[in-house]
Amino acid sequence: MHTGTYMGCFTHDSSERTLRGAVFYDLRKMTVAHCQEACAERAYSYAGLAQGAECYCGNSLPAAAAPGRECSSECRGQRGSECGGIGRLSVYSAQPRPAAGPRRNVIYRGCFRAPENLTDTFPASLIQPNLTVEMCSEFCSKKEFPLAVIRGQQCLCGFPTRRFPLRDGADGRRCGGGSNGSAAGGQYCRVYQTPVQDTRCTDRKFLTTKSKVFVALSSFPGAGNTWARHLIEHATGYYTGSYYFDGALYNKGFKGEKDHWRSRRTICVKTHESGRTEIEMFDSAILLIRNPYKSLVAEFNRKYAGHLGYATERTWQGKGEPAPRGCRDTHPRAAGTWLGTASKSGGSSPAAAETSPKTPDTWEQLSSRCACGPRGEGSAAPWPQALLGTGNRKCPCTAPLGTARLPG
């Protein structure tokens, strides 16, 4: 068990983090030692815990201290331990274990041509006689940079950028000394990846002000809603919310899972609801439509093996209770309700404009509006009996006329 020093209780602003390194969540098993070990492995000096389940890593202590009584949240996986609070961090030291030889997790990326303007490309630098890889990596890790660059006696720290994209490597002999030596100079430099994670594209936050437009991210289960949320969060830098709560997704970094779905602090809200009352709670919607056959298969896999797993062959062939016969009609009915509601409320999307406002009640009604089957017009595929409760059936079409067709 890691035994770092408790540094105290500090204020914590999730939108402008002081501990700017890696972030981890564990709603059930978070402990002080778990957080310390995770941060130490990535060469961070401090581990901060918040709300009993969140772990933040960094190399600089937060500036503003808070009264100790405000860090009163108990760690979810360790009774009697302090794991911060709302807007508060319990900070511990995360001293890496001493290791003989080169530092672990330092990866040689190769020899590259040095950029013309070193000062603009690399925010931190150090000139050191007899500079070694370990010395440069240690220096850049403490500065929280993922790249350590050696050019002669100069150590440079930074990120991959347009000026320094790390795409076109040079012959290692141009750097002199190979990947293990300390000498490199002239127009070329040796690049190493430190244990520090590059969080520029993974940092997300809640909206600073409540959103004026309440947006739904709607789909049938298994249509790729979670994957779409991942793309939206990393493209925008803002969390997405959920009408439900899934602890497994929260532990994977979907922090909006824990936020109330009507808080309007997230950029959009996941929902599988298709009742008119639930739909009308939102101002607008992103509607995901996937091949219904593949959606049902994906949802069956999720139900029996989690978000990333696959149901066993025994599960597919078992005699357990099959999905209701009506499930084959749920997908078109749900999509049709969203489209019909958008059409009646003046929606201007192609899907709303070109789809009849009458909501399809059955699979056959939606199929009559379809452009083609999943493998071309007239294609057929077997429907697992565990999904439909019936024998084989023609596979439904991919998308209604006028809607965007998504791959898979």
Image (cartoon, helix red, strand yellow):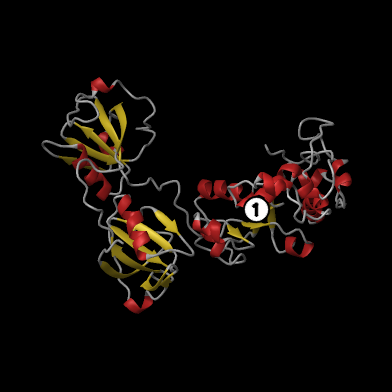
Q: Given the image, on which type of amino acid does mark 1 rest?
A: Tyr
**405 relative position to 265: left or right:** right
Residue found at x 37% / y 74%: 71
Disc 1 crowd, CA 10 A, few/some/many (<14, 14-19, 20+): some
**304 relative position to 380: left or right:** left
**Disc 1 element:** helix
Residue 21 vs 91, above or below: the answer is above
Residue found at x 73% / y 63%: 278
Instruction: Name the quarter where the C terminus is drawn.
Output: top right
Q: Which of 333 and 249 is in front in this view?
A: 249
Q: How many marks?
A: 1
Residue 101 in sight from this viewpoint = yes
The quarter of the picture where residue 265 lies is bottom right
Q: Position of residue 10 (x, y in %)?
A: 33, 69
Residue 222 in sight from this viewpoint = no
The quarter of the picture where residue 193 lies is top left
Residue found at x 27% / y 68%: 6
Q: Position of residue 4 (x, y in %)?
A: 26, 63
Q: Which of 242 and 393 is in front in this view?
A: 393
Q: Which of 208 and 291 is in front in this view?
A: 291
**Label 1, on which residue?**
304
**273 relative position to 245: left or right:** right
Residue 278 vs 41, above or below: the answer is below
Q: Where is residue 359 in the image (x, y as percent from the top left)?
A: 85, 52
Q: Position of residue 132 (x, y in %)?
A: 17, 37
Instruction: Name the quarter where the N terminus is drawn.
Output: bottom left
The residue sitting at the bottom extreme is: 69
